[in-house]
Amino acid sequence: MAEKTRGKKEQPPEKAVAKPGEKPAAKPAEKPEEKPEEKPVEKPVEKPKEKKPEKVKKKKKPAYTRYKVDISGLTRLRPYCERCGPGYFMADHGNRYACGHCGFTRYKRA
């Protein structure tokens, strides 16, 4: 077990100090490091940026596409959502109707 010393601080090891009149200890001669010749790095040529085609925005379908006008009055072409209530039409996907608001899906009878 290591002994604990109380009140005494550990001192760092003393460095070798050259006395006046003495020559400092000679270091062994180091060989200069030979670096391999570096070739200049060529930067890749930047191509001019191509313009991306603008996105085509969807146009909202007007309300008259959801109704059919007859002599007797208006008839709805698509059903309302059963969960959301009147005002939320269901999308026609061939074999089913789907609500875009809540995600409710009703399958058509074959």
Image: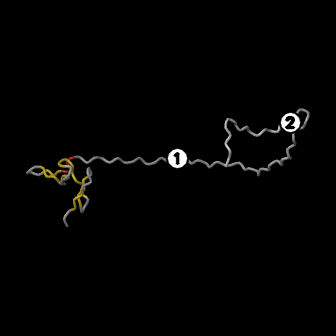
Q: Position of residue 33 (x, y in %)?
A: 80, 49
Disc 2 is placed on an element classified as: loop
Q: Quadrant of the C terminus?
A: bottom left
For the question of whether residue 24 can be seen, the reply is: yes
Q: Position of residue 15 (x, y in %)?
A: 79, 38
Q: State which tag comes first along the sequence, 1 or 2.
A: 2
Towards the viewer: 64 or 36: 36
Towards the viewer: 59 or 19: 19
Horizontally, residue 18 falls left or right of residue 106, namely: right
Towards the viewer: 66 or 50: 66
Taking the view exactly as shown, the residue that stands out farthest to the left is: 72
Q: Position of residue 97 (x, y in %)?
A: 23, 58
The amino acid pointed to by label 2 is Ala
Image depth: mark 1 or mark 2 in front: 2
Q: Residue at x 55, y 46 (%)?
A: 48
The amino acid pointed to by label 1 is Lys
For the question of whether residue 65 can be seen, the reply is: no
Disc on res. 31: none
Instruction: Find disc 1 in the rendering and name its residue.
Output: 49
Disc on res. 18: 2
Q: Quadrant of residue 10?
A: top right
Taking the view exactly as shown, the residue that stands out farthest to the right is: 21
Estimate how packed mark 2 is, as few (under 14), some (14 to 19) or many (20 or more) residues with alpha carbons within 10 Å: few
Towards the viewer: 31 or 25: 25
Q: Position of residue 30 (x, y in %)?
A: 83, 47
Horizontally, residue 103 falls left or right of residue 45, namely: left
Disc 1 is placed on an element classified as: loop
Q: Residue at x 77, y 50 (%)?
A: 35
Estimate how packed mark 1 is, as few (under 14), some (14 to 19) or many (20 or more) residues with alpha carbons within 10 Å: few
Q: Residue at x 71, y 48 (%)?
A: 40
Q: CA distance from mark 1 to mark 2?
A: 67 Å
Q: Residue at x 68, y 47 (%)?
A: 2
